[in-house]
């Protein structure tokens, strides 16, 4: 019996080790090559449209808009915002439900490899993958992949496809207001449109623009250079 348990443990360890090596290889390749698809794209019930654009070609307003809206500590954390997680867990204990508390790095990991929903299992996998992305990719690549794989409507993935769809122009030419309007579509891109904003979303756009101005145009320079 003991030998059988040892054999099972040994086989499980080998499978885990090989899976980990495969994941590291995939992440290493994606550090240089645009991911051909993502878990979220494969799960999409709609036809997928995506156009990749280098972060160096983007309007400077785009990265700043998404960091301002989604994760202002992005330049300084290591993939997981433990302060936000503690707050989310505290609210969960108080009966408010499990909230997101995801960083841009975690959202990138989730969109690439995982599934939607809020569970401790998925959050644990998401956090582990986020730490791997921070180690293997770095901030600039994470932000580049994030804006290229995020969903911006029913089957619309990536900021370039979104910019062409909603504004009829490349994401390299987006204004501050347009970048902010795309940023506020998250985390509900299938029910929001940057061209048909509710009062709440208009106020949200104003807030994002104000945050962009306060952070300043040089806020992301250390991680984008």
Image: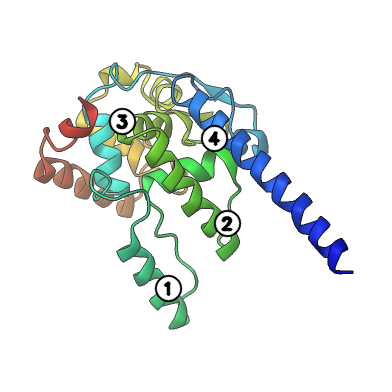
The residue at the far bottom in this view is 94
Q: Position of residue 40 (x, y in %)?
A: 59, 39
Location of mark 1 (residue): 89
Q: Are marks 4 and 2 in contact (CB under 8 Å)?
A: no
Label 3: how many residues lie within 10 Å, few (<14), some (14-19) or many (20+)?
many
Considering only order in the chain, which callout, 1 or 4, is on the residue closer to the N terminus?
Answer: 4
Considering only order in the chain, which callout, 3 or 1, is on the residue closer to the N terminus?
Answer: 1
- Which residue is at 34% across, 62% downward? 82
Of marks 4 and 2, the one in the foreground: 4
Location of mark 2 (residue): 122
Q: Which mark is residue 205?
A: none
Q: Visible in this render: residue 186?
A: no
Q: Are marks 4 and 1 in contact (CB under 8 Å)?
A: no
Taking 174 as reference, is 89 left or right?
Answer: right
Judging from the image, what secondary structure is the residue with disc 3 in? helix
Figure colour scheme: rainbow
Instruction: Reply above or below: 143 against 189.
Output: above
Looking at the picture, tell me which residue is in the foreground, 78 or 89: 78
Taking 48 as reference, is 148 left or right?
Answer: left
Considering only order in the chain, which callout, 2 or 4, is on the residue closer to the N terminus?
Answer: 4
Location of mark 4 (residue): 24
Of marks 4 and 1, the one in the foreground: 4
Using the numbered discs, state the Cα–Cα distance from disc 1 to disc 3 in whole angstroms. 29 Å
Judging from the image, what secondary structure is the residue with disc 1 in? helix
- Which residue is at 32% across, 22% downward? 55
Query: Quarter holding the C terminus?
Result: top left
Q: Which mark is residue 140?
A: 3
Using the numbered discs, state the Cα–Cα distance from disc 1 to disc 2 in whole angstroms. 15 Å
Considering only order in the chain, which callout, 2 or 1, is on the residue closer to the N terminus?
Answer: 1
């Amino acid at each position: 019996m003991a030998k059988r348990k040892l054999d099972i443990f040994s086989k499980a360890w080998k499978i885990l080790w090989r899976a980990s090596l495969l994941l590291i290889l995939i992440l290493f390749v994606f550090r240089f090559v645009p991911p051909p698809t993502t878990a979220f794209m494969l799960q999409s019930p709609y036809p997928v449209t995506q156009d990749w654009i280098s972060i160096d070609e983007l309007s400077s307003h785009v990265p700043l808009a998404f960091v301002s809206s989604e994760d202002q500590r992005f330049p300084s954390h290591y993939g997981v915002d433990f302060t936000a997680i503690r707050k989310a867990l505290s609210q969960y204990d108080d009966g408010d439900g499990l909230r997101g508390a995801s960083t841009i790095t975690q959202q990138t990991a989730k969109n690439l490899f995982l599934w939607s929903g809020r569970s401790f299992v998925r959050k644990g996998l998401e956090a582990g993958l986020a730490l791997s992305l921070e180690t293997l990719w770095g901030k600039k690549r994470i932000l580049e992949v994030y804006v290229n794989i995020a969903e911006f409507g029913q089957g619309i993935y990536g900021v370039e496809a979104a910019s062409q769809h909603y504004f009829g122009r490349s994401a390299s030419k987006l204004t501050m207001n347009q970048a902010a309007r795309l940023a506020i579509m998250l985390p509900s891109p299938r029910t929001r449109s940057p061209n048909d904003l509710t009062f709440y979303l208009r106020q949200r756009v104003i807030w994002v623009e104000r945050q962009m101005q306060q952070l300043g145009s040089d806020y992301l320079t250390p991680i984008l250079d």
